[in-house]
Amino acid sequence: MVPVLATALAASVGAALAVVAAAELLRRQAALARRRIGKALGEEALDADRVWRKKYGGPPLDLLVLGDSVAAGLGAERRKDTLGARIARGLAKRLHRPVRLRVGAVVGSESSALAAQLDALDPAYRPDVAVVVVGGNDVTHRVPVPVSVSHLVEAVDRLHALGCVVVVGTCPDLGALRPVPQPLRALGARASRQLAAAQAVAARAAGAYPVSLAEVVGPFFVDHPDEAFSLDRFHPSALGYRRTAKALVPSVLRALGEEDGTPPGPGHERPEGRARTDLSGR
């Protein structure tokens, strides 16, 4: 009995030491990733708020963009290359209508910050469509998925209460981040996929249009990191934002009731509930 107990105790101690060693390895790798990425781009994205494509004339479509640094456009060197501006220009070209962009996204935001971003809007502001891209910081800060998703759903509900349709770009694939060493990158990839899947389910149930960024545009970031990422190798470059906006625009048009009969393709989903799409009076 004693030898068996001793063997079991040794195995337990060995397992505990392995867990501690793994945790220390991940801690060191996280510190290394932070040093590699740094803050070469600063913490302020370019201000892209304006009416895009005024030449079309008529009342502009009001587009709101909320979320984290990707939504804010950090990494773009020209305001026309930010995510919001890219989406606005794509919509204007498709609709032959000016688009008034309002970016409420804040660099470094987790999903919990969406409430403050909405609170910061003018009480009289009424967007026609909102695009929300958030989740990467929830993963890196280890926010539990149910907590993260609950904040997203609350934001979607508040946006619907403002009378607009909502498109959610789910958490990008963190496995595309080359500066993050293995096995931390693999763990980040798995966690980001889990959050993205939960976001998609919750967004659909809340009446939003989810777009799987990992599925639609993720392969481009994995296969072409030098072109897709900006100086810090963490945020998208101008080309990365162009590809991300291109991935989102079809679902934005669908949400607005402006489909051309061509299916948007894999990674684009419809909401389970009813969403407002009639903007003829605005």
Image (cartoon, grey):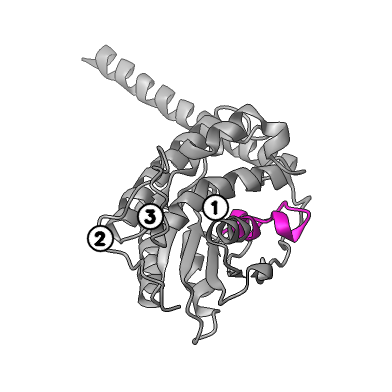
Q: What's the mark number on residue 137?
A: 1
Q: Is residue 22 above or below residue 92?
A: above
User: Which of the two labelled residues, at mark 2 and mark 3, occupies the earlier sequence position?
Assistant: 3
Helix, strand or loop under label 3: strand
- Labelled pair 2, 1 in contact (Cβ < 8 Å): no
Given residues 28 and 130, the one toward you in this image is: 130
Give the CA separation, mark 2 to mark 1.
Answer: 28 Å
Which three-letter amino acid code belongs to the residue tagged 3? Tyr
Which image quarter: residue 275? bottom left
- Labelled pair 2, 3 in contact (Cβ < 8 Å): no
- Magenta stretch: includes residue 77: yes
Given residues 188 and 114, the one toward you in this image is: 114
**Can residue 170 be seen?**
yes
Residue tagged 2: 273
Which three-letter amino acid code belongs to the residue tagged 1? Asn
For label 3, the crowd category at 10 Å Cα-Cα, with few meaning under 14, some 14 to 19 and many 20 or more, is many
Number of numbered discs overlaid on the protein picture? 3
Residue tagged 3: 209
At horizontal 37% and vertical 43% (from top left) the residue drawn is 197
Q: Which residues are magenta?
A: 68-86
User: Which of the two labelled residues, at mark 2 and mark 1, occupies the earlier sequence position?
Assistant: 1
